[in-house]
Image: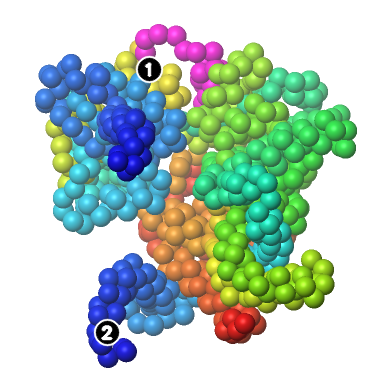
């Protein structure tokens, strides 16, 4: 069969490969070169050392990982329920899909600014809380002195902003589950929870894997939301990279930070591939 | 037949969409060169022609709009005004210099930025400076425009500084015997403490966020006021006193300050009652409610009442695409009418001493008065913007930001933190070979931080 196709498939793939090579692979190689280039053009660890020795490195690394660990489960639980709602094809389903997909239409920074108007001291949240009589004083949610409160604000903002991406992948996955399996489960008297646990989730594995990997990679790059909500109150890796590149004008250390983000993304991808292996299970 | 019906249904929406897109394209083309209206009529502008102006000042969108619609409105040529953040600003100008040709016609930047570009990149404008001598451009600033040589490389354009503004409801909490136009830093702390004691809220505010100019507070106000110097007194006992003062005062400062970039927003919303910031970032509050706010000079410390004048200038790169047009633009921007418009629209103060026509708005008058009071004070101590640091400017600012983060936010010992940051500071001077600047005493060769 493949003998007949010959080199045609590869030729068709060539434009995509060229695009990826020029716009992704080449800059990535250049970035790594930047991170490790020595003063005399050779290989050097100076920039990596400088990154590791920076006062904000440890807190940036810890905060980024903490954000990823906190945001992903929240988003997946939310996305799963949203996807099940969409998939149930209730009345007015079109409206639900529209409402859920709204946050996809705005940029990360715009979302951050929207949430600032909610969390700021004279913002919506305090107005609502005080109006309902729950608090008497304005609470300072974005205080640089309470980093965990800031992290909570960012988790909420990120959950609002990015859950739709996961939801859409899960909806697609749900719709590819053959109805026969669910009908068979009904015949055997399974409850909804059993159906979800025993039929839906296992068959959703490929979609879950894809969504997890995608979302985790994006989560390691969290930047604009943090800048908008926390300012200099907490550090994250992407913000440090930007600071070294623009404020301190040192592209080498910025490249080191970028390289670190890449390594973390790679590590988590491999982790998910190992923990969530997908098998072809579509036998009747 | 059925296909025709379906297509017919889409005809009207398609035509409407095309019309909207065409309209959008027209307006999009017009806005950058904005003075389309003015320049369409004035064909005498053939001399000035089209110029691309790249500027690190007036970058926020609102200010760019004002530049295009008000300040440049009466210019005879067409100006494509591009406001850029520090990174792209540096990159673009340096790239064109390296390439040996480019589209940029004229550069608007800070004194420190021109210093970084250096004489090699800029055109000699000494003849233009002589021509404009009648306007009475500030002598000190003209001198700065020579970048340490005998040749004029940039013409001073406008200036700004940093002051403080308070909501009037805060005035009743001033300490006894304090004169708001001659406060000390100790009195500022007491003021904050009084407000917190009476209202339970922390109402002092500083722009300690990502976009905030917080590092200028240390370089131009805090350090010189307490120690009389900046780099040569970095680890001195007086500096430790300054940091202790800041740590003490921070308990009366709104903790959300780490997100603040432009203090006028917080002043207007009431989150902050007493703020320090750049004049341009406070003007909205003063304009919106002149009766509700008071502008006043920064406080004084043991070393004097330090303040930082910010000088912006206009320079012509050697690779300029339109040097004659650039000179026309400089003449225009330095004229009394335009200097007055600049002051009124973006609240950057003039650099010429020629009479400006017209009255100032109430908010601007308040700022101008505060600036005047500060400059005329007996203990006034001008502390210049860092000069000659070139690409190390960011690293220099970072030293002070790190000191703030570690001492005030993380609670480390000031003396230890300053000692550990001293090598970073010296590295900046060793790499840039910049000499010390006022109020530090002049140095032979690179500044020696202590």
Density class for disc 2 (Cα within 10 Å; few <14, some 14-19, many ≥20) is few
Q: The residue marked by circle 1 belongs to what chain?
A: B
Density class for disc 1 (Cα within 10 Å; few <14, some 14-19, many ≥20) is many
Question: Residue B37, how many percent across, how many down?
Answer: 25, 19
Question: Residue B368, how many percent across, how many down?
Answer: 51, 20
Looking at the image, residue A70 lies above or below residue A135? below
Looking at the image, residue B51 lies above or below residue B136? below
Question: Residue B257, how many percent across, how many down?
Answer: 67, 42
Residue at the image position 70 percent from the left and 28 percent from the top: B270
Q: Which residues are magenta?
A: B356-376
Question: Residue A173, how many percent across, how many down?
Answer: 59, 67
Q: Quadrant of residue B128?
A: top left
Judging depth in this view, the residue of B222 and A271 nearest the camera is A271
Q: Could you tell me if the residues under marks 1 and 2 are in contact, i.e. CB atoms within 8 Å?
A: no
Q: Which residue is mark 2?
A: A5
Q: How far apart are the two marked residues, 1 and 2, measured between alpha carbons?
A: 75 Å
Q: Is any atom of residue B219 visible in this view?
A: no
Query: Can you tell which of label 1 and label 2 is closer to the viewer?
Result: 2
Residue at the image position 46 percent from the left and 34 percent from the top: B309
Residue at the image position 78 percent from the left and 20 percent from the top: B172
Judging depth in this view, the residue of B355 and B66 nearest the camera is B66
Q: Which mark is residue B13?
A: none
Residue B415 is one of the magenta-drawn residues: no
Magenta: main secondary structure: helix
| Secondary element at image label 1 | helix
Q: Which residue is mark 1?
A: B340
Residue at the image position 60 percent from the left and 46 percent from the top: A94
| Secondary element at image label 2 | helix
């Amino acid at each position: 069969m493949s003998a007949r196709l010959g080199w045609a498939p590869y030729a068709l793939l060539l434009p995509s490969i060229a695009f990826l090579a020029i716009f992704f692979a080449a800059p990535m190689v250049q970035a790594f070169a930047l991170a490790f280039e020595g003063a005399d053009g050779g290989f050097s660890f100076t920039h990596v050392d400088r990154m590791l020795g920076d006062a904000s490195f440890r807190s940036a690394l810890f905060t980024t990982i903490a954000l990823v660990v906190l945001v992903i489960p929240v988003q997946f639980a939310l996305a799963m329920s949203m996807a099940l709602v969409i998939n149930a094809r209730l009345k007015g389903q079109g409206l639900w899909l529209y409402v859920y997909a709204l946050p996809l239409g705005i940029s990360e920074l715009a979302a951050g600014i929207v949430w600032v108007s909610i969390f700021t001291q004279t913002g919506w949240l305090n107005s609502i809380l005080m109006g309902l009589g729950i608090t008497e004083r304005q609470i300072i949610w974005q205080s640089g002195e309470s980093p965990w409160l800031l992290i909570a604000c960012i988790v909420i903002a990120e959950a609002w902003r990015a859950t739709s991406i996961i939801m859409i992948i899960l909806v697609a996955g749900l719709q590819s589950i053959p109805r026969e399996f669910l009908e068979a489960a009904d015949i055997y008297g399974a409850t909804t929870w059993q159906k979800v646990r025993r039929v839906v989730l296992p068959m959703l594995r490929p979609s879950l894997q894809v969504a997890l990997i995608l979302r985790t990679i994006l989560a390691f790059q969290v930047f604009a939301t943090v800048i908008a909500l926390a300012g200099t109150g907490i550090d994250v890796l992407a913000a440090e990279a930007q600071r070294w590149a623009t404020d301190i004008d040192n592209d080498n250390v910025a490249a080191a930070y970028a390289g670190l983000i890449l390594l973390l993304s790679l590590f988590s991808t491999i982790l998910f591939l190992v923990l969530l292996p997908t098998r072809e299970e579509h036998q009747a | 037949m059925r296909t025709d019906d379906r297509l017919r249904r889409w005809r009207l929406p398609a035509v409407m969409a095309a019309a909207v897109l065409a309209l959008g394209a027209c307006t999009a083309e017009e806005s950058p060169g904005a003075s389309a209206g003015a320049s369409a009529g004035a064909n005498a502008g053939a001399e000035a022609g089209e110029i691309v102006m790249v500027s690190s000042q007036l970058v926020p969108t609102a200010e760019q709009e004002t530049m295009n619609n008000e300040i440049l409105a009466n210019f005879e040529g067409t100006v494509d005004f591009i406001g850029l953040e520090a990174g792209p600003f540096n990159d673009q100008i340096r790239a064109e210099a390296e390439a040996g040709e480019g589209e940029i016609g004229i550069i608007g930047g800070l004194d420190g930025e021109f210093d970084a570009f250096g004489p090699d990149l800029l055109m000699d404008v000494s003849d233009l400076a002589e021509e404009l001598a009648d306007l009475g451009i500030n002598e000190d600033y003209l001198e700065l425009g020579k970048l340490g040589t005998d040749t004029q490389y940039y013409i001073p354009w406008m200036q700004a500084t940093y002051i403080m503004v308070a909501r009037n409801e805060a005035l009743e909490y001033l300490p006894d015997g304090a004169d708001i136009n001659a406060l000390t830093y100790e009195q500022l702390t007491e003021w904050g403490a009084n407000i917190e004691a009476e209202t339970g809220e922390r109402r002092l505010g500083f722009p300690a966020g990502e976009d905030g100019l917080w590092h200028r507070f240390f370089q131009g106000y805090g350090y010189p006021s307490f120690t009389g110097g900046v780099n040569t007194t970095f680890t001195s006992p007086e500096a430790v006193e300054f940091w202790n003062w800041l740590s003490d005062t921070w308990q009366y400062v709104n903790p959300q300050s780490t997100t603040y970039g432009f203090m006028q927003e917080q002043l207007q919303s009431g989150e902050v009652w007493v703020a320090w910031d750049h004049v341009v970032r406070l003007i909205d509050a003063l304009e919106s409610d002149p009766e509700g706010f008071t502008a006043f000079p920064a406080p004084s410390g043991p070393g004097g009442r330090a303040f930082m004048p910010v000088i912006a200038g206009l320079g012509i790169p050697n690779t300029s695409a339109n040097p004659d047009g650039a000179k026309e633009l400089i003449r225009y921007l330095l004229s009394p009418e335009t200097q007055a418009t600049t002051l009124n629209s973006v609240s950057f103060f003039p650099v010429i001493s020629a009479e400006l026509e017209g009255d100032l708005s109430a908010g601007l008058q308040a700022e101008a008065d505060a600036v005047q009071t500060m400059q005329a004070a007996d203990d006034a101590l001008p502390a210049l913007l860092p000069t000659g640091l070139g690409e190390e400017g960011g690293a220099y600012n970072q030293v002070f930001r790190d000191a703030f983060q570690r001492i005030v936010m993380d609670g480390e010992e000031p003396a230890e933190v300053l000692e550990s940051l001293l090598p970073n500071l010296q590295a900046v001077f060793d790499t840039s070979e910049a000499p010390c600047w006022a109020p530090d005493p002049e140095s032979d060769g690179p500044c020696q931080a202590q």
